[in-house]
């Protein structure tokens, strides 16, 4: 918004200002704190207070750096099987690309998810690997890796079972990730956004993902192109915490370029037509 319009917004009553903020968020779906500060000619502290009040009333959702539209109905988490049926060839290509970065003797963490499951499948095909140890909280990934034993040592964290994703969460999983040192963590997610970073749809698994990131020297996010530009409910990591993002050709080019401009090493994997 130009300076003249920004000046016109100064000094309006707080209630009217918040109404206008809400309208902007609804119209654009995401608004940054810095942009709202400039538009209304008020401090970022005041903007955050306004957004917090609107969020307290259930009118929008606060995210890192701004606010997004609040869904009238909460999004339901898709099952693993539902997600696996989408972007199949792209996920297979992402998995193969990620598996190619693993070396013999490494200890890695493989997160829950469909792209990470594609990574596990591709890892089984790496007959050249020896003495690789994989820590995972996914029952699906453990079963996929079973044929590669003993070349790949598979450690399942244990924990409370989440049936929709066949995943294991606290109390045991968090304890394990808090006490290991891995070379690389391969993380799945529901959203990668230039402002909001890496996000996920549910709190228990987001908590596990954060512990995986903390347990590894290097973090690689694997996500099909539909995840880029999305903001989900729970924060997993800031972009600064991510060493690499492996995605597919369906990723919006403008989001890829913005992420690269922010220092994220983005690699586009070719789809695997055999999937």
Image (cartoon, grey):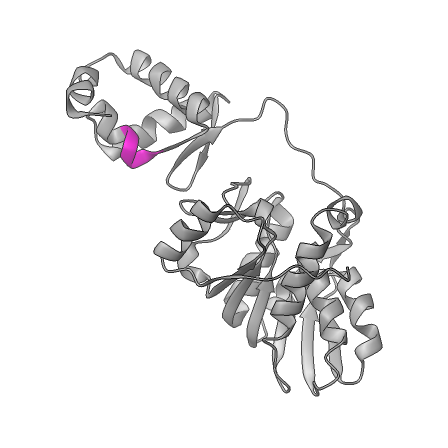
Relative depth, front residue between 221 and 173: 221
Can residue 241 be seen here? The reply is: yes
Q: Residue furthest front?
A: 273
Residue interval drawn in magenta: 32-36
To which quarter of the image does residue 105 belong? bottom right
To which quarter of the image does residue 97 belong? bottom right
Can residue 170 be seen here? The reply is: no
x 69%, y 87%: residue: 131
x 47%, y 20%: residue: 57
- Compared across the picture, whether 49 is left or right of 167 comes to left
- Compared across the picture, whether 160 is left or right of 213 comes to right
**Above or below, 143 relative to 103:** above
Q: Quadrant of the C terminus?
A: bottom right
Q: Where is residue 60 shown, x and y percent of the image?
A: 47, 25
**Above or below, 234 relative to 222:** above
5 inside magenta stretch: no
- Compared across the picture, whether 223 is left or right of 169 comes to left
Q: Where is residue 123 shown, x and y percent of the image?
A: 71, 73
**Above or below, 242 relative to 202:** below
Q: Where is residue 258 shown, x and y percent of the image?
A: 39, 50
């Amino acid at each position: 918004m130009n300076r003249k319009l920004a000046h016109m917004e100064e000094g309006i009553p707080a209630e009217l200002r918040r109404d206008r903020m809400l309208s902007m968020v609804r119209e654009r779906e995401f608004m940054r704190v810095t942009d709202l500060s400039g538009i209304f000619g008020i401090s970022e502290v005041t903007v955050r207070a306004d957004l917090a009040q609107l969020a307290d009333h259930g009118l929008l959702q606060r995210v890192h750096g701004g606010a997004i539209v609040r869904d009238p109905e909460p999004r339901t988490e898709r099952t693993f099987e539902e997600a696996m049926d989408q972007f199949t060839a792209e996920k297979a290509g992402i998995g193969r690309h990620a598996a190619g970065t693993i070396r013999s003797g490494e200890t890695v963490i493989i997160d829950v998810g469909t792209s990470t499951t594609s990574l596990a499948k591709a890892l089984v095909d790496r007959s050249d690997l020896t003495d690789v140890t994989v820590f995972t909280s996914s029952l699906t990934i453990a079963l996929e890796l079973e044929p590669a034993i003993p070349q790949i040592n598979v450690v399942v964290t244990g924990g409370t079972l989440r049936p929709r994703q066949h995943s294991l969460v606290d109390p045991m999983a968090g304890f394990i990730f808090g006490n290991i040192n891995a070379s690389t963590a391969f993380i799945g997610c529901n959203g990668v956004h230039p402002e909001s970073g890496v996000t996920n749809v549910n709190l228990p698994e987001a908590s596990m993902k954060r512990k995986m990131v903390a347990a590894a020297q290097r973090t690689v996010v694997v996500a099909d192109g539909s995840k880029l530009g999305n903001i989900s409910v729970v924060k997993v990591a800031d972009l600064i915490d991510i060493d690499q993002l492996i995605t597919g050709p369906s990723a919006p080019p403008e989001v890829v370029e913005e992420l690269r401009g922010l220092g994220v090493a983005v690699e586009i994997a070719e789809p695997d037509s055999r999937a």
